[in-house]
Amino acid sequence: MFVKSSKELYGWDRFSKVTLLLGIFLIVARSWILASTLIIYSIWRSRSTNMSGRNNEKFVYENIERNFHYKIKNFRQSFKQNIKNFKIKIKKYKPLEQLKEKRNYMITYCPKCRQKLRVPKRKGKIIVTCSKCSSEFRLRT
């Protein structure tokens, strides 16, 4: 019944330590039944002689942990990308600058090539030269 050497025992692995720490945390959170169950289970796992069963449990735990970390990593990356996209949208949309531009400049189009042109306001009759097709036309601002 008693084990003679510690080589026959499974020992403390990561899963046993996590269940023990979770049990201690649940004691602090006043969940006595679940906490004591987890603590007893972690001690039983560490003192077990069934190595293959404990290795299978550890393998399942490591897969769950790996998937959890992978999902957190993907969530962080997508969150950072969303924040980056949001900042780009904020930089593109600047209502105060657009309002200042609308006060000081008039937007017109070239009659030949329909290029959008920006001309200063309150200059009277001016001759505008298109930057694309170099055609000249008169405009009152």
Image (cartoon, grey):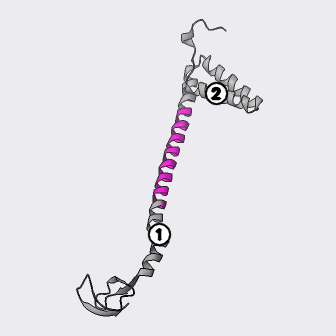
112, above or below 27, in the image: below
Q: Does the segment drawn in magenta span residue 4?
A: no
Q: Does the segment drawn in magenta span residue 62?
A: yes
Q: Residues within 10 Å of mark 1 (few under 14, many from 20)?
A: few
Residue beneath the point at 44% across and 80% down: 102
37, above or below 102, in the image: above
Residue beneath the point at 59% across and 19% down: 50
In the displayed image of the protein, which residue is found farthest to the left?
134
Q: Is residue 5 left or right of residue 88?
A: right
Query: x and y percent of residue 10 in the render?
Result: 57, 18
Residue 67 numbered tag: none
Q: Is residue 65 left or right of residue 1?
A: left
Q: Label 1: which residue?
A: 94
Query: x and y percent of residue 107 in the render?
Result: 39, 84
Q: Is residue 19 left or right of residue 139?
A: right
Q: Label 2: which residue?
A: 21
* Nearest to viewer (mark 2 / mark 1): 1
Q: Judging from the image, what secondary structure is the residue with disc 1 in? A: loop
Q: Residues within 10 Å of mark 2 (few under 14, many from 20)?
A: some
Query: x and y percent of residue 39 in the render?
Result: 68, 24
35, above or below 87, in the image: above
Q: Is residue 117 left or right of residue 23?
A: left
- Which amino acid, by three-letter code, is at mark 2? Leu
- Which amino acid, by three-letter code, is at mark 1? Lys
Query: x and y percent of residue 15 in the render?
Result: 58, 28
The magenta-colored residue range is 60-86
Residue beneath the point at 65% across and 20% down: 43
Figure quadrant of the C terminus: bottom left
111, above or below 72, in the image: below
In the displayed image of the protein, which residue is found farthest to the front?
123
Q: Judging from the image, what secondary structure is the residue with disc 2 in? A: helix
